[in-house]
Image (tube, grey):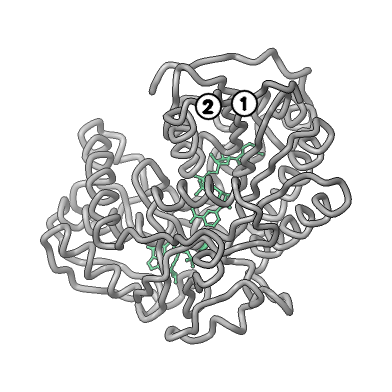
């Protein structure tokens, strides 16, 4: 690494958390290199003054040569790239989720080879032992609860493996790896449709769709009694920065400890939308664990801080953003091409609210396997800058 380098490298920068992290690093005056396999037009946030490595040829972090270029002269690497989504996606795409091991391995290896001093890995609450999450009124999960290992099939096993790889790279090669276990993050500029969305965005969209269609009904996956805590994006970005700058070597929870049932999440979204809906429970939909919360004892001890944005406050901002996106789609006519709500057949086409098995058959890059993968030319030189911001 060049002695004077201050470059922050963010992978998964075209995604939800990566986009917000790039924005925060920029505001802090850091030079940023943003990397994502998605074409730049599909990034949630794009900044013209940032070096953007985008698309299957320049931004696929499964490819070691892309990783080498991405970390060049980097002072810190935030490894957020992953093929991921909510329960509907991770239960139906386990092989894809496990393939993120290529991304994590190659980024870690490239960072170590280039002597990048700091490396951040975004792990997940999905690493926790499933047997400790069988009741909705669960005791909050503390860090040792990841062992003995029985994580979420596919996605959780990959995260747990990559956590351990970070640890061994730190112990054996001295790279300063930091690992945070995110608990369900939500906010504006994230996935709210298409099959990868998580419950907060999905529920907002369904409430908005019900209002728009005039059919005041909502489909909820499971019986609605399952519990979760949801962390607002601003807390997540602040936590990432603080954990990266800390001396916390072991994986640590980064999540809200405000536990709610999915029914309570729907209550809040209905209040924000000013509507009351008839609830239908889809009991065979992907449900995940019965209860999950974040024990924040350790993060409070180390940082004297924990995520504190209330769900009511964060969801209002998220709802407002999704509502704008939703109406943009309806007005542009794009909505007709999307899944139609199971409760809106025969009414005006609106972005849907069903469990989308179609998410298995999306465009190849959306599934994470780029067109021409394994049969391609040398990566092109970096294209700096982009249109939106
Ligand atoms: P996201 O899907 O919005 O962003 C991930 C980005 O990674 C996407 O833009 C995707 O195109 C990109 N990507 C996928 N494969 C890639 C590859 N091979 N090379 C380069 N880029 C690639 O997801 P997010 O919510 O922003 O999540 C960011 C990170 O945080 C992920 O590692 C995720 O597993 C982790 N995490 C998120 C949550 C959450 O609730 N959002 C919870 C736990 C962990
Ligand atoms: O998808 P998710 O937010 O992921 O689902 C939370 C709960 O909400 C599940 O029980 C799900 O069945 C229920 N739910 C009800 N209706 C809906 O319309 C819906 N859509 C969705 N998506 N869910 C609905 C997540 C992982 C992430 C990440 C975090 C870490 O698990 O999917 O990839 O790692 O955990 O905390 P969740 O919280 O189970």
The front one of 135 and 246 is 246
- Give the percent coordinates (x, y) of residue 232: 38, 54
Q: Are marks 1 and 2 in contact (CB under 8 Å)?
A: yes
The front one of 287 and 66 is 66
The Cα–Cα distance between marks 1 and 2, rounded to whole angstroms, is 7 Å
Instruction: Say which quadrant the N terminus sits in.
Output: top right
Q: How many marks?
A: 2
Q: Is residue 295 above or below residue 119?
A: below
- Give the percent coordinates (x, y) of residue 355: 42, 61
Mark 1 or mark 2: whose residue is earlier in sequence: 1
The front one of 288 and 133 is 133
Crowdedness of circle 2 by 10 Å Cα count: few (<14), some, many (20+)? some
Q: Which mark is residue 30?
A: 2
Q: Residue at x 27, y 37 (%)?
A: 329
- Give the percent coordinates (x, y) of residue 147: 71, 77
CB of mark 2 near ligand 1 (< 8 Å)? no
Q: Is residue 163 above or below residue 15?
A: below
Instruction: Say which quadrant the C terminus sits in.
Output: top left
Residue that numbered label 1 is attached to: 6
Which type of secondary structure does the marked residue at label 2 adopt?
loop
Which type of secondary structure does the marked residue at label 1 adopt?
loop
Crowdedness of circle 1 by 10 Å Cα count: few (<14), some, many (20+)? some
């Amino acid at each position: 690494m060049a002695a004077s380098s201050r470059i922050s490298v963010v992978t998964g920068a075209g995604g939800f958390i990566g986009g917000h992290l790039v924005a925060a690093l920029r505001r802090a005056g850091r030079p940023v290199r943003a990397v994502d396999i998605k074409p730049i037009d599909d990034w949630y946030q794009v900044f013209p003054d940032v070096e953007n490595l985008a698309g299957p040829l320049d931004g696929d972090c499964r490819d070691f040569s892309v990783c080498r270029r991405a970390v060049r002269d980097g002072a810190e690497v935030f490894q957020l790239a992953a093929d991921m989504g909510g329960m509907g996606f991770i239960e139906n795409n386990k092989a894809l989720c496990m393939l993120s091991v290529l991304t994590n391995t190659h980024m870690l290896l490239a960072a170590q080879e280039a002597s990048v001093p700091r490396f951040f890995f975004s792990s997940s609450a999905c690493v926790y032992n499933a047997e400790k999450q069988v009741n909705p009124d669960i005791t909050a999960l503390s860090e040792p609860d990841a062992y003995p290992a029985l994580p979420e099939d596919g996605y959780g096993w990959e995260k747990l493996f990559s956590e351990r790889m970070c640890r061994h790279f730190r112990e054996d090669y001295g790279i300063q790896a930091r690992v945070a276990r995110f608990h369900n993050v939500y906010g504006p500029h994230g996935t709210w449709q298409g099959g990868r969305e998580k419950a907060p965005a999905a529920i907002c969209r369904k409430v908005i769709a019900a209002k728009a269609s005039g059919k005041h009904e909502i489909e909820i996956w499971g019986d609605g009694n399952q519990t979760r805590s949801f962390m607002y994006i601003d807390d997540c970005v602040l936590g990432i920065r603080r954990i990266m700058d800390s001396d916390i070597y072991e994986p640590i929870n980064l999540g809200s400890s405000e536990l709610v049932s999915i029914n309570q999440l729907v209550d809040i979204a209905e209040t924000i939308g000013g509507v009351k809906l008839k609830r239908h429970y889809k009991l065979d939909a992907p449900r995940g664990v019965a209860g999950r919360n974040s024990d924040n004892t350790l993060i409070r001890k180390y940082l004297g801080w924990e995520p504190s944005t209330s769900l009511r406050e964060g969801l209002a901002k998220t709802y407002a953003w999704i509502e704008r996106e939703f109406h943009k789609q309806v007005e542009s006519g794009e909505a007709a091409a999307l899944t139609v709500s199971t409760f809106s057949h025969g009414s005006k086409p609106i972005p849907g609210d069903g469990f989308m098995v179609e998410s298995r058959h999306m465009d190849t890059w959306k599934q994470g396997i780029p067109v021409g993968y394994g049969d391609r030319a040398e990566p092109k030189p970096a294209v700096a800058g982009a249109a939106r911001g």
